[in-house]
Amino acid sequence: MSDQNEAIANALEMLMISQHGIGAAIEELAKWVRERGSTDVADNAVTALEVLDLHAEGITSAIRVLRGE
């Protein structure tokens, strides 16, 4: 693997790890909001989590391609 591909793969991996952290925070906030009766807001947060999960799959695929896996 080229140094450039490795650098890109590493950067994408760091972004994905950050994305997982953001997702965990959104999940906790959605739970807190739902417990206080704002189900619409909580549902919107869950929808955002689904988008993060979908994008994480794409990022993982790109990392594998760059690393030749």
Image (spheres, rainbow, N blue to C red):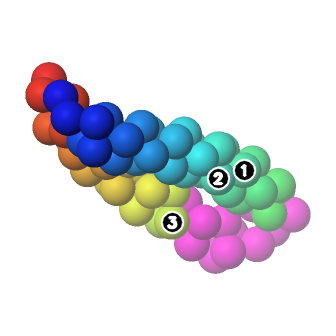
The answer to whether residue 49 is above or below residue 40 is above
Few, some or many C-alpha atoms within 10 Å of disc 2 (few <14, some 14-19, many ≥20)? some
Quarter of the N terminus within the rendering: top left
Residue position for label 1 = 25
Residue ID at (80%, 63%): 33
**Residue 44 in view (yes/no):** yes
> Extreme front residue here?
3
- Which amino acid type corresponds to the residue marked 1 in the rendered image? Ala
Do tag 2 and tag 1 residues touch (Cβ < 8 Å)?
Answer: yes
Left or right: residue 29 versus residue 23 is: right
**CA–CA distance between discs 3 and 2?**
11 Å
The stretch in magenta equals: 34-46
Quarter of the C terminus within the rendering: top left
Dot 1 or dot 3, earlier in sequence: 1
Residue ID at (45%, 46%): 11
Query: Please, what secondary structure does the residue beneath circle 1 have?
Result: helix
**CA–CA distance between discs 2 and 1?**
5 Å
Q: Position of residue 27 (x, y in %)?
A: 66, 50
Q: Nearer the viewer, mark 3 or mark 2?
A: 2
Query: Please, what secondary structure does the residue beneath circle 2 have?
Result: helix
The answer to whether residue 61 is above or below residue 53 is above
Q: Which mark is residue 48?
A: 3
